[in-house]
Image: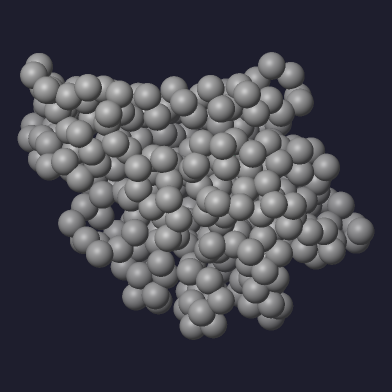
Amino acid sequence: MTTKSIRASSRKDAHIDLALDPETNSEGKNSFDRMSFRHCALPELDIATIDLTTSFCSRHLSAPMMIGAMTGGTARAEAINRALATVAQEKKIAFAVGSQRAALENGQSAAYLRDLAPDIPIIGNLGGIQLAQSTGLDLAKAAIDDLQADAIAIHLNPLQEAVQPEGESDWRGVRDAIANLVRTDTAPVIVKEVGAGISVQVAKELFDCGVMAVDVAGFGGTNWARIEAARRRYDTNLFIPFLDWGIPTLECLLSMRGSFPDQHIIASGGVRHGLDAMRAFWLGAETISLAGPLLAQLLRHNKTPSPDSLSGLVDQLQRQMALTLFLTGAPDLAAFRRKEALIDNKLI
Ligand SMILES: Cc1cc2nc3c(=O)[nH]c(=O)nc-3n(C[C@H](O)[C@H](O)[C@H](O)COP(=O)(O)O)c2cc1C
C-alpha cells in the first residue's frame, strides 16, 4: 500500500464514525415536511395488497429503494458492504457501493459482493475528479468489471472536496470525462451529488451528456461539509459560512418536476422514513436511496454490522411506503402519482 492509499483508507474509516455523529447531520432541513397528501377516508383497499414493485437497471425490485453509496476498501468497510449486500439481496432492493478508487488502486477486489447479491442491481462508484484524471476511464471500466456492476455512479462533491483537508480543487474537465465514459458504453452511467444537491441546470447538462440517471443527493441528511470540517485541524473558521450550503432534496425535486419526463431521477439526501420516500417518488424520483440512516441502523447495537437490524428497518420503510399509498387510496405506484399532493398546504 502507498502512503496515499493508507491515508485514503483511514479517511474512509473516519468518515464512517463521523457520519454516525448527530452533529454532522442536517436532518429535517431537507424541506420534506412542506409536502403532504390528501387523506382518503375510503380507500377500498386491503393494505396487504398494496403493490410497490418496480424495476431498476432491468432487474425486479420489491420497492423503488436503494441502499446508497457508502464505503469500500478497508476491512471494516468490507464487513459493512457484505452486510448491506446481503440485506439488499434478501429484500430485493438496489445496492450501491462507495468509491472503489482506493480498493482498485490497492489491487483489492469486491467481486464477492456480486456472489452475495446475484439478483439485484449493484451500482459501482467513482469520483468525478478521479474520472477526469488520465487513468480515469480505465479505473471506471475496472470498477464496473470487478462488481459486474449494472451501472456506475460518478459522484460530484465539490463542496466536500473544498472542505476536506486533503481535498482536490481542480474540477475542470469533469463534464467531458463523464460524456467520454458514457460514449464507451461499458455500463449505464449515473451521476450523483453526496448531499449538496443537483440543480435543474446541472441535471440538464448531465442528461445532455447521455447519463442514464441523476441522483439529486440533496441537502438535509448526511452533511459532508460538517464531516470534513470536523477532520480539519486548521482553517476551520474559513468554512463556517458553508456548513449548511446546498439545495434541499425537496427543492431539487420540485425544480426538476416535469423537466425530465423520460429520464430516471433518483432521490437521496435526508430521506428519513417511508413517507419521505413516497414524497420524493410522487415528485418524479423513480428510485429512492438512503445512506446515513441505514448505516446507523446497521451499526446500532455495537460496531459489528447487524444485518437483522437493518433488515427490520427496510421492512419498516416499505410498510411506511405502503401505508402512504393506502391512505391516499392508491393500489400501486402509478395510481399514487395521480393522487393529489400539497406543498405548504397548497395543491401542486
Ligand atoms: C459513511 C458514508 C460514506 C459515503 N461515501 C460515499 C462515496 O464513497 N461515494 C458517493 O457517491 N457517496 C457517498 N456517500 C454519500 C451518500 O451516497 C448519499 O448521497 C448522502 O449520504 C446523502 O444521503 P443520506 O442523507 O441518506 O445519507 C457516503 C455517505 C455516507 C453516510
Question: Is residue 43 something that shows in the picture?
Answer: yes
Residue 199 or residue 309, whichever sits in front = 309
Q: In this view, does 281 lie to the left or right of 272?
A: left
Q: Is residue 45 above or below residue 132?
A: above
Say which residue appears at 37% left-offset and 24% top-offset: 319
Q: x, y (%) of residue 335?
A: 16, 41
Say which residue appears at 22% left-offset and 22% top-offset: 46
Say which residue appears at 12% left-offset and 42% top-offset: 338
Q: Is residue 83 above or below residue 102?
A: above
Say which residue appears at 24% left-offset and 41% top-offset: 333
Q: Check the picture and name the quadrant holding the N terminus.
A: bottom right
Question: What sort of colour scheme is used for the picture?
Answer: one colour
Q: Check the picture and name the quadrant holding the C terminus.
A: top left
* Image quadrant where residue 110 sits: bottom right
Residue 149 or residue 135, whichever sits in front = 149
Q: In this view, does 141 lie to the left or right of 291?
A: right
Q: In this view, does 169 lie to the left or right of 181?
A: right
Q: x, y (%) of residue 300?
A: 65, 20
Question: Is residue 195 something that shows in the picture?
Answer: no
Q: In this view, does 161 lie above or below 86?
A: below
Residue 177 or residue 73, whichever sits in front = 73
**What count of labels does the image hold?**
0
Q: In this view, does 93 lie above or below 313?
A: below
Q: x, y (%) of residue 129?
A: 61, 67
Q: x, y (%) of residue 2?
A: 90, 61
